[in-house]
């Protein structure tokens, strides 16, 4: 008399699917524990739109000082948009901005921005306005690339794109450099932001 198999084909398939689901859950849990996933795609896209508007507004300013004020105002607005969007995304993901992954991200991302602020004061003091756009793009790209090492894969690519653009911008006159910032802080943020929003949960 033949002995019936312990599992039929359907049970084996179901067991296999459950095992795959469990492995997927474990992998995603480990990824969230080691990577900072609250980079806000929609917030980044919003920053891109405001940066494009800022570039257009800055281009028609009659003095270098007013040009600078437009971009400083844009930086403050971008910080507000990005911070709010990041907080909301972290909350939706039931994540904490004080987690180990978030701390690693911020410790890598913030120092180049702080250096950029100090360098900007020095450059403005010497009247080197034409160097500012390239320096901003390079240092921001450095921060994004460094922080992106602790985030999803597309973030370091964004940082690398900023580095390339910043390197070129250093050799452009201010009028063209202003539009290079529109390409970087505007178009790159908008494009990469939409990719992150679509593929990484908003």
Image (tube, rainbow, N blue to C red):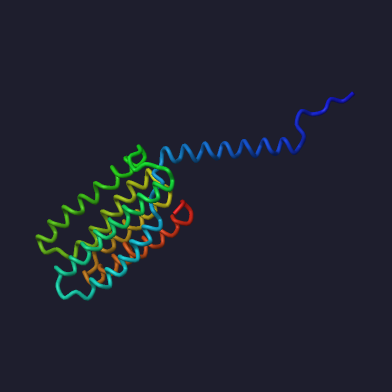
116 to the left or right of 84: left
Q: Which residue is the extreme one toward the right?
A: 1
The answer to which quarter of the image holds residue 171 is bottom left
Residue 107 lies, with reference to residue 139, above or below; the image says above
Write the residue at 31% across / 52% down. Answer: 83
Quadrant of the drawing holding the C terminus: bottom left
Residue 83 drawn above or below residue 186: above
Q: Residue furthest left?
A: 125
Residue 37 to residue 192: above or below: above
Residue at 33%, 53% (x, y): give it. 84
Give the image location of residue 105, x and y in percent.
Answer: 33, 44
Q: Position of residue 133 (x, y in %)?
A: 23, 62
Q: Is residue 60 above or below residue 155?
A: below
Residue occupying image coordinates x 26% and y 53%: 139
Q: Residue at x 21, y 67 (%)?
A: 70
In depth, the one of 33 and 152 nearer the eye is 33
């Amino acid at each position: 008399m033949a002995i019936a198999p312990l599992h039929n084909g359907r049970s084996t398939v179901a067991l296999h699917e459950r095992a795959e689901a469990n492995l997927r859950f474990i992998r995603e849990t480990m990824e969230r524990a080691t990577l900072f996933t609250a980079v806000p795609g929609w917030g980044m896209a919003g920053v891109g739109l405001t940066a494009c508007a800022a570039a257009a507004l800055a281009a028609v300013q009659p003095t270098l000082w007013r040009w600078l004020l437009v971009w400083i105002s844009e930086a403050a607005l971008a910080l507000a948009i990005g911070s709010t969007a990041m907080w909301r995304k972290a909350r939706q993901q039931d994540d904490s901005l004080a987690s180990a992954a978030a701390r690693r991200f911020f410790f890598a991302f913030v120092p180049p921005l702080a250096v950029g602020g100090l360098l900007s004061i020095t450059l403005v003091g010497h009247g080197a306005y034409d160097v500012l756009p390239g320096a901003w793009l390079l240092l921001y790209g450095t921060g994004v690339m460094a922080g992106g090492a602790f985030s999803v894969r597309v973030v370091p690519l964004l940082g690398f794109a900023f580095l390339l653009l910043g390197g070129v911008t250093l050799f452009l006159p201010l009028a063209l450099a202003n539009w290079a910032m529109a390409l970087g802080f505007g178009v790159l943020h908008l494009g990469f932001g939409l990719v992150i929003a679509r593929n990484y949960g908003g």
